[in-house]
Image (cartoon, rainbow, N blue to C red):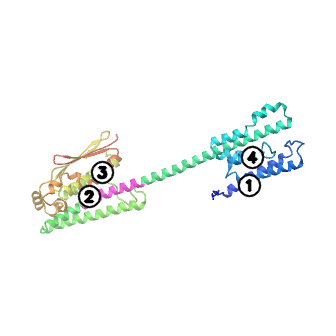
Amino acid sequence: MRRINRIHRTRRDWAADLGLFLFAACFAAVSSQSIPVAESLGPGWRAADQAAGGLACAAVLLRRRWPVPLAVVLLVAGSVAHYMTGPAMVAVFTVAATRPWRVTAWVAALAFAPLPFFLWRLPDLPEDRAGSAVTYFALIAGAIGWGLFRRSRQQLIASLRERAELAEADAESRAERARMEAREEIAREMHDVLGHRLSLLSVHAGALEFNPGAPREEIERAAGVMRESAHLALHDLREVIGVLRSGSGTGPVEGERPQPELADLARLVAEARAAGGRIEVAGPPEGAAPPPLVGRTAYRIVQEALTNVRKHAPGAAVAVRVAGGPGDGLTVEIRNTRPPGPEAEREAQREAGPGAGADTGHGAGPDAAASAVAGIGQGSGGQGLIGLAERARLAGGELTALPADGGFRVHAWLPWQG
């Protein structure tokens, strides 16, 4: 047995259906006195005609389930009965408002099919019959036009609602991308800052482990550097967590120390030299300071490069060159030579003492020199250089990192507006 699909109607739908039912009934009642009915029809026919009009008004409640069949039946019945105009108007309005253009066109063609015959017979019709017919066709045309307007308005509202939903989804997507970029920026800060501090700790701890019989003064100096590096690492970690808790992730929160700039490069090099690094520096240029973003990016590039050399090419010499100026851009270049072999590395550690030893956890072993030729290019599975390249791109510049002369070369250019 075939099941009939139920139509769920809201209170607003019921109110609209009842309103249209009352409209059809009232229209039939008001127009009953003006509808021309032939005198030859008896009282029984007139009663049947009025009963058919009442049933047609009640059938308006079926307009949502069968709009097209209802309109066809009422239009055909209207050619015989005299009280179908109100229900027919509701039916054709429903078709025009809810059905495609082609269906509406077929129903309209059926409604106006008698129009040519009416126009042909117009000179012979009585004046009241002609006026009633003209009024009927005008009302049907008005109902179809109003239905088409209603459907266009509903389509416009649906389109605007869809656009609003798309705009809201796009705004949420942009906000999520902004949050992801903020998290990536924080991750890069943690990688750069904590990696630098912890690599210093590893260098000094490795030196103490390799040479436990060093003089007391050397051990105290190395322990002091380790304590200071650990303290600064914890401080930097607290800053990053503070940014996370602030919910922005795009700038320092109140109470944080300023972000590093290019002028802090001398302090960074001094810390690396204190850990035993052989570093030569040319620059930075004197005079006007670069924009904060450019200076901070250049500082992070040098910091990551020195960290990777300490971790993966201990004992290698490093040359840092920073040049440029307003209008020309800022150029940052870091090169490291091939690290010494295992024996030369151990001898250098014995001579330098615990405060200048190499990171034995990464550089010891017979294959240490061969595996650490890249130097700057190693570290964190290559993610460090990927982060640096992203930093340079966000600052409007570019970064390249390639092997050179048995070591590695990192070259970056950053824009510096005049």
Nearest-to-viewer mark from 4 and 3: 4
- In what element is the residue under mark 4? helix
- Amino acid on which the number 3 mark rests in the picture: Ile
Residues 395 and 352: in front is 395
Amino acid type, label 1? Leu
Screen quadrant of the C terminus? top left
Residue that carries the numbered disc 2 in the rendered image: 196
Residue 354 % position (x, y) = 15, 64
Q: Which mark is residue 386?
A: 3
Q: Is residue 158 left or right of residue 66?
A: left
Give the label on residue 50, or none. Answer: none
| Eye-nearest disc, 3 or 1 | 1
Q: Earlier in the sequence, mark 1 or mark 4?
A: 1
Name the mark on residue 74: 4
Q: CA distance from mark 1 to mark 2?
A: 77 Å
Bounds of the magenta span? 179-198
